[in-house]
Image (cartoon, rainbow, N blue to C red):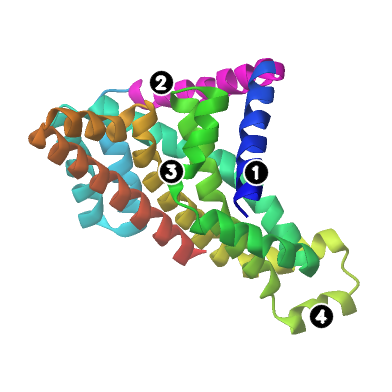
């Protein structure tokens, strides 16, 4: 058994060394692409003054949650700026948005296919179980080896962690379409495309939106953890404060994280309920 473990470990190490030696141009391109996406989202978030962004997000919260929630959201975001953490807060939000967009671009089509193909769904279950039960830090190690330190590594690890909830809940929503509606569609001669867009998707939409919400929350948790690899944002601020025993800064950054998490969670939950 010990020989097997040693052989397995050396095989993994040799595979990583081979990739870094022979496929460096691929990972350099991927890193440039991921960091370019992150930089673009961050630039857009930091383009307007903080009070404009806070007001816009407050208006969105007012629209979906009510007046009180809208005011509280705007004030809470303004408090992040008052603590001197506006750029870090927007960097964290940019990482979450970029990672979630990538994760959903893969997860939603895969979840739809899994919902329509039971064999694929059964094959994905152990893979998703493995991803969700592994310690989140484990996804940072190969990313560091292949992409180095920085936002690209944080994005890759965050995408991996954010994908399973969206795949599971999308597949579940597709499978839960009432049989009588499917039979009605077949009896009326609808095409497979019409069956999906007009019957399956409307019934699956609440479950899909719940998956989007869960992916956002998983992405948020991983982005904070990924601050250890120099991803920027509030996660890196907290790790820096821990190293220097700067308790005040760590508390301020934690408050900013709570604000962002609550805003994203409440807004996406409300959108899911209205679908």
- Give the residues drawn in magenta, as a range: 22-47
The N terminus lies in quadrant: bottom right
Quick one: which residue is furthest to the bottom in this view?
180
Q: Nearer the viewer, residue 194 or 108?
A: 108
Gap between marks 1 and 4, in whole Å? Answer: 54 Å
Q: Is residue 130 above or below residue 161?
A: below
Q: Earlier in the sequence, mark 2 or mark 1?
A: 1
- Give the Cα separation between the discs numbered 3 and 2: 28 Å
Residue matched to label 3: 137
Few, some or many residues within 10 Å of mark 2 (<14, 14–19, 20+): some
Q: In terms of image quadrants, where is residue 68?
A: bottom left
Query: Does residue 125 show up?
Result: yes
The answer to the question of whether label 3 and label 2 lie on touching residues, with beta carbons closer than 8 A, is no
Q: Are marks 3 and 1 in contact (CB under 8 Å)?
A: no
Mark number, residue 184: 4
Question: Badge 3 local density, few (<14 within 10 Å), some, or many (20+)?
Answer: few
Q: Is residue 159 magenta?
A: no
Q: Secondary structure at mark 4?
A: helix
Confirm whether residue 98 shows in the render: no
The alpha-carbon separation of the residues under discs 3 and 1 comes to 20 Å
| Element marked by disc 1 | helix
Residue 267 vs 82, above or below: the answer is below
* Mark with earlier residue (3, 1): 1
Residue shown at the point (91%, 72%) measured from the top left: 189
């Amino acid at each position: 058994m010990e020989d097997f473990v040693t052989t397995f470990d050396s095989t993994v190490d040799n595979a990583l060394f081979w990739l870094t030696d022979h496929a460096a141009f691929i990972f350099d391109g991927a890193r440039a692409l991921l960091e370019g996406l992150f930089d673009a989202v961050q630039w857009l978030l930091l383009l307007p003054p903080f009070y404009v962004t806070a007001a816009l997000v407050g208006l969105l919260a007012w629209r979906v949650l009510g007046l009180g929630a809208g005011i509280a959201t705007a004030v809470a975001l303004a408090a992040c700026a008052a603590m001197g953490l506006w750029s870090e807060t927007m960097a964290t939000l940019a990482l979450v948005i970029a990672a979630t967009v990538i994760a959903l671009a893969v997860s939603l089509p895969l979840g739809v296919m899994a919902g329509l193909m039971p064999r694929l769904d059964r094959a994905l279950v152990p893979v998703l179980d493995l991803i969700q039960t592994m310690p989140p830090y484990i996804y940072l190690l190969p990313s560091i080896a292949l992409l180095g330190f920085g936002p690209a590594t944080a994005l890759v690890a965050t995408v991996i962690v954010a994908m399973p909830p969206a795949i599971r809940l999308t597949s579940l929503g597709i499978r839960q379409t009432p049989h009588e509606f499917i039979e009605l569609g077949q009896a009326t001669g609808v095409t497979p495309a019409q069956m999906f867009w007009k019957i399956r998707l409307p019934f699956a939409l609440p479950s899909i939106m719940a998956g989007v919400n869960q992916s956002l929350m998983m992405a948020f948790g991983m982005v904070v953890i990924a601050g250890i690899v120099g991803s920027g944002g509030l996660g890196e601020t907290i790790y820096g404060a821990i190293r220097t025993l700067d308790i005040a800064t760590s508390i301020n950054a934690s408050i900013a994280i709570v604000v962002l998490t609550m805003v994203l969670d409440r807004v996406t939950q409300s959108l899911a309920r209205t679908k």
